Amino acid sequence: MSEALLKAILRLFVIVAKEDDITESERKKVIEFLEQHLNHKNAEKYVAYFDEIGNKAVQNSQNKTAVSEMQDLLSYCKQINIELTKKQKTVLVKELIELILADGIITKKEKDLVNAIANSINVDLKTSTISKFLLAPAPRMILWVMHSLLLEIEKMKM
């Protein structure tokens, strides 16, 4: 994974997580993600990067317009489209959903962001279990959807 790709992914995580402030549980989810993909030393480096850009994003959230944020999001998605396969993109959307679920609060804006990201990286939500997450009204239903998504990703491995 290139540094540019990793930074683009972390910036997407920040955009999604900052919607209801970046909680410790969301931060832990990012640490898990980094530890799965990097060695310990690099994971620590990128946790510090996430913290830095996360703090700046929370502080500047009042000054940033929706259009400006969407332009940033599309820029990060462009990098992801260049470097990730379809399966990897689906897994990334799953990671974003898990990040949203980490604090137990799912806002409409968070769902809208996942939808926008999925569309921008060409993950077809209409044929994916991810669409059920975006429509799920209750926490129990969301757990079922996450289970279904994991099964769908496992099928892609075969």
Image (cartoon, rainbow, N blue to C red):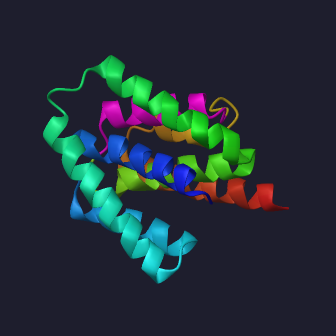
Q: Residue furthest top?
A: 67
Q: Is residue 26 visible?
A: no
Write the start and end of the magenta stretch as one range. Answer: 106-123
Magenta-span inclusion, residue 53: no
**Relative vertical location of residue 112 with respect to residue 83 in this rendering, above or below:** above
Q: Quadrant of the N terminus?
A: bottom right
Q: Is residue 108 left or right of residue 128?
A: left
**Relative vertical location of residue 68 with respect to residue 121 in this rendering, above or below:** above
Residue 48, position as x, y percentages in the image: 31, 66
Residue 131, position as x, y percentages in the image: 56, 35
**Relative vertical location of residue 14 with respect to residue 66 in this rendering, above or below:** below
Residue 57, position as x, y percentages in the image: 24, 42
Magenta portion: prevailing SS class: helix
Q: Is residue 52 left or right of residue 100?
A: left
Q: Nearer the viewer, residue 138 or 20?
A: 20
Q: Quadrant of the C terminus?
A: bottom right
Q: Nearer the viewer, residue 141 or 64?
A: 64
Residue at 68%, 47% (x, y): give it.
83
Q: Residue furthest bottom?
A: 40
Quarter occupied by residue 51: bottom left
Quarter occupied by residue 112: top left
Residue at 39%, 37% (x, y): give it.
137
Q: Is residue 55 visible?
A: yes
Residue at 26%, 44% (x, y): give it.
18
Residue at 59%, 33% (x, y): give it.
78
Q: Nearer the viewer, residue 127 or 62?
A: 62
Residue 98, position as x, y percentages in the image: 44, 55
Magenta-span inclusion, residue 115: yes
